[in-house]
Image (cartoon, helix red, strand yellow):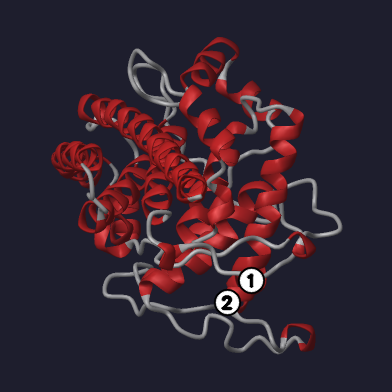
């Protein structure tokens, strides 16, 4: 009788051990990919643009939090933490060089977005939530809602970098109306979420103050984030269902990065992680190298015309080895988010809210 009673417990123990082993393998894959990504930054730190640097700074924040809170309860996990510490040290050194190069090569853009280049700006989720399919728009626009100039202007007003010693957390009516517009697709949608996320991390309160629309009277900033990420989830599901293409993979990864950093756990799907890992170039460690080869062959202007999901912020840079600066940035940031999520899964207090 006693032996029979122990069997379920033994089975549960085996299941738990298998789960831990599986999670350890995933973390190994993530750390290996990130190591190759940092090697890429070490070689290309003089050439990477600001958008690219921001993605690596997000990763820096994610790694620092991971190292600080790592649940190193066994030799395997302890070894992984040691790997993460070494990786972080390399990243710190390379980013310092990359940011110095940015300040020299693109001083205006650097000044406008300098706060985003400090890892302490970025907050790592401590609690998780899930998207809500009922919040998906009945229909969306077929083209972007606004351009990069308006997006940049609204963000600099939040950051206080719109002029020297500028006042932060300024919300103009055009910015508020644009960033709360429903039905925006693609990068317009992701940058609406980015606007609210940066506002929160900058410490801005009352982003919705002055909105007199009766239909939005009870809306909160969290409500908007729920709506945006629920629609970004639907967009990603559609992208996967239709098959990832060179035109959709960048926004697919960006959605994972931004919604993951906002605290939506359901973006960290295992099959989506595998999609990202497969996109990495084994030779140089970047992401999006194939797309750049296409642009070199047929020309950037023609490629721009062929892409239905053109970026809001088009300060893309194809690096000397043919890599996409933006896609590499969002990929390493997204992988850092996956690492944070898998580590948080070992702490029941950080499980998704129900």
x 43%, y 63%: residue = 348
Q: CA distance from mark 1 to mark 2?
A: 5 Å
83 above or below 68? above
> Residue 281: horizontal and vertical position, in percent?
41, 18
Q: Residue furthest front?
A: 1
> Residue 106: horizontal and vertical position, in percent?
29, 44
Query: Between residues 108 and 187, which one lies in front from this camera angle?
Result: 187
Q: Is residue 17 left or right of residue 258?
A: left
Label 2, residues with CA under 10 Å away: few <14, some 14-19, many ≥20: some
Label 1, residues with CA under 10 Å away: few <14, some 14-19, many ≥20: some
Which structural element holds mark 2?
helix
Pointer 2: what residue?
221
Task: Give the label on residue 224, or none.
Answer: 1
Query: Between residues 250 and 158, which one lies in front from this camera angle?
Result: 250
Task: Give the label on residue 127, or none.
Answer: none
Res. 129 in view: yes
Res. 179 in view: no
x 52%, y 46%: residue = 4
């Amino acid at each position: 009788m006693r032996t029979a009673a122990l069997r379920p417990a033994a089975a549960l123990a085996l299941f738990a051990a298998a789960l831990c082993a599986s999670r350890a393998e995933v973390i190994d894959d993530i750390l290996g990919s990130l190591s190759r990504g940092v090697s890429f930054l070490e070689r290309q730190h003089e050439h990477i643009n600001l958008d690219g640097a921001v993605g690596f700074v997000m990763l820096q924040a994610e790694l620092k939090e991971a190292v600080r809170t790592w649940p190193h309860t066994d030799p395997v996990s302890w070894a992984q933490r040691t790997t993460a510490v070494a990786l972080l040290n390399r990243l710190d050194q390379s980013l310092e060089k990359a940011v110095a190069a940015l300040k020299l090569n693109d001083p205006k853009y650097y000044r406008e977005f300098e706060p985003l280049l400090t890892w302490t700006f970025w907050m790592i989720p401590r609690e998780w939530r899930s998207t809500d399919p009922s919040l998906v728009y009945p229909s969306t626009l077929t083209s972007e809602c606004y351009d990069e100039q308006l997006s940049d202007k609204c963000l600099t007003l939040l950051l206080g970098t719109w002029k020297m010693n500028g006042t932060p957390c300024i919300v103009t009516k055009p910015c508020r109306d644009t960033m709360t517009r429903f039905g925006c697709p693609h990068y317009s949608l992701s940058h609406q979420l980015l606007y609210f996320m940066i506002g929160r991390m900058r410490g801005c309160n009352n982003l919705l103050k002055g909105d007199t629309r009766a239909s939005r009277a009870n809306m909160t900033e969290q409500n908007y984030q729920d709506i945006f990420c629920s629609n970004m989830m639907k967009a990603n599901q559609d992208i996967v269902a239709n098959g990832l293409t060179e035109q959709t993979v960048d926004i697919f990864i960006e959605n994972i990065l931004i919604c993951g950093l906002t605290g939506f756990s359901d973006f960290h799907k295992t099959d989506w992680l595998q999609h990202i890992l497969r996109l990495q170039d084994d030779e140089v460690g970047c992401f999006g190298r194939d797309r750049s080869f296409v642009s070199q062959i047929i020309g950037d202007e023609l490629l721009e015309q062929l892409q239905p999901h053109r970026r809001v912020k088009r300060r893309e840079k194809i690096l000397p080895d043919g890599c996409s600066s933006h896609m590499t940035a969002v990929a390493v940031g997204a992988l850092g988010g996956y690492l944070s999520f898998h580590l948080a899964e070992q702490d029941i207090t950080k499980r998704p809210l129900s």
